[in-house]
């Protein structure tokens, strides 16, 4: 088991390294960051100092080494760098120190704030949105799947399949526009929902207020596709289980159909569903960009889109790295859970 965990963790680190390389060489080739930092100022001496601070006066491979040193939790930095960058961690050594530290994602070109602080402010919004969407997808998907399985061949089964196919086929950005317009504009008088809004609104008289109703429409939009897939998986898996001998035995013993389905059959049909749930949670973290932008929900997705519009590449790079870490972490955790549940996976 330890060897299995180490192997999966090593693969995850390789994927993360590939993401770091791709992100660096993709975004470092656009324009001159020193000009973006300076804005309209054209002082040659100031520009040269900024280029030196950002390591732009070094060859590209050295720039990558410095970037890797910044974002790595283990790095080598001078005393001046530690003070200038505000690095936090444990450092040992003389003028040049080896440290175990928080990754340093550098500073925003526009606000001059640390990218890590900017993204940490937006991360709870994205996590809450993904959790709400996944809860909706799980409850709705399993319910639809069970209904379709026990009512196989009826109008309920046909309707569930139709809803699932529609949910899988419709892109999130399209469904977001439709849902926002329909429930947040046309029917707003009845639903009490708005087209845009974040978790907290600031009222000039009441101050900062929690607005959970603003979570409803983006969570619904983001959860439609995984709900459709979970419904299909639940239906197919449950139909296979319902044909097993022990289910017929349970019915023959006089157990109520509700007990047989929910306590015995569904329990053994959820293995592929659990795998889909863990995988889709990571997908939702990465796929909330368009949904957050459409509904004005303050999260990492909206912050990233705004940064792209302003060519604020450190924020974009940090956002991609954080999202990738979550995606890889959830994927590795899913593999490990699979190995715990089914020992045959560890042997393969």
Image (cartoon, rainbow, N blue to C red):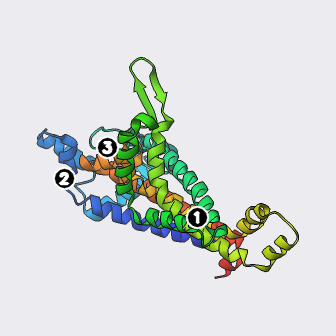
The mark nearer the N terminus, 2 or 1, is 2
| Mark closer to the observer (2, 1) | 1
Nearest the camera: 338 or 37?
Answer: 338
Q: Which residue is mark 2?
A: 32
Q: Residue at x 34, y 61 (%)?
A: 23
Q: Which residue is mark 3?
A: 108
Residue 115's place in the image compared with 257, above or below, is: above
Residue 299 versus residue 144: which sits nearer the camera? 144
Q: Secondary structure at mark 1?
A: helix
- Which label number is shown at residue 333? none
Residue sitting at the far front: 155
User: In the rendered image, which quarter contains the C terminus?
Assistant: bottom right
- Mark 1 sits on what residue? 156
Compared across the picture, whether 105 is left or right of 41 comes to right
What percent of the width, then of the height, locates residue 88? 48, 42
Position of the N terminus, as image quadrant, is bottom right
- For label 2, the crowd category at 10 Å Cα-Cα, with few meaning under 14, some 14 to 19 and many 20 or more, is few
- Against 306, is 328 above or below? below
Instruction: Decide which of 165, 227 is in the foreground and name it.
Output: 165
Q: Give percent across and percent down for residue 259.
A: 79, 61
Q: Does residue 323 show up?
A: yes
Please say if the residues under marks 2 and 3 sit with CB atoms less than 8 Å apart.
no
State the separation of the CA atoms marked 1 and 3: 53 Å
Judged from this view, the residue extending furthest toward the right is 253
Q: Is residue 326 left or right of residue 107?
A: right
Where does residue 205 sit, x and y in percent of width and height?
Answer: 41, 17
Q: How many marks?
A: 3
**First in sequence: mark 1 vs mark 3:** 3
């Amino acid at each position: 088991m330890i060897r299995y965990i180490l192997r999966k963790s090593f693969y995850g680190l390789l994927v993360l390294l590939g993401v770091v390389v791709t992100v660096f060489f993709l975004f470092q080739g656009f324009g001159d960051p020193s000009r973006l930092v300076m804005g309209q100022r054209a002082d040659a001496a100031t520009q040269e100092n900024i280029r030196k601070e950002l390591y732009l006066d070094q060859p590209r491979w050295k720039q990558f080494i410095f970037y890797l040193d910044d974002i790595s939790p283990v790095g080598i930095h001078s005393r001046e760098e530690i003070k200038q960058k505000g690095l936090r961690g444990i450092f040992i050594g003389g003028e040049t120190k080896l440290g175990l530290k928080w990754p340093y994602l550098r500073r925003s070109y526009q606000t001059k704030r640390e990218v890590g602080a900017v993204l940490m402010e937006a991360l709870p919004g994205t996590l809450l949105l993904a959790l709400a969407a996944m809860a909706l997808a799980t409850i709705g998907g399993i319910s639809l799947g069970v209904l379709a399985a026990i009512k196989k061949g009826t109008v309920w089964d046909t309707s569930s399949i139709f809803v699932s196919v529609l949910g899988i086929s419709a892109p999130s950005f399209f469904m977001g526009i439709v849902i926002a317009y329909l429930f947040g504009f046309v029917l707003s008088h009845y639903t009490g929902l708005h087209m845009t809004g974040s978790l907290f609104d600031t009222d000039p008289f009441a101050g900062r207020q929690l607005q959970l109703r603003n979570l409803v429409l983006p969570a619904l939009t983001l959860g439609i596709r995984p709900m459709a897939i979970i419904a299909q998986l639940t239906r197919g898996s449950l139909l296979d289980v319902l044909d097993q001998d022990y289910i017929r035995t349970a019915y023959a013993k006089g157990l109520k159909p509700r007990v047989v389905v929910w306590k015995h059959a569904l329990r053994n049909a959820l293995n592929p569903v659990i795998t889909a749930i863990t995988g889709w949670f990571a997908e939702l973290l990465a796929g909330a960009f368009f949904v957050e932008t459409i509904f004005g929900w303050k999260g990492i997705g909206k912050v990233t889109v705004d940064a792209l519009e302003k060519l604020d590449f450190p924020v974009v790079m940090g956002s991609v790295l954080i999202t990738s870490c979550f995606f890889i972490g959830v994927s590795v955790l899913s593999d490990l859970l699979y190995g715990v549940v089914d020992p045959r996976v560890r042997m393969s």
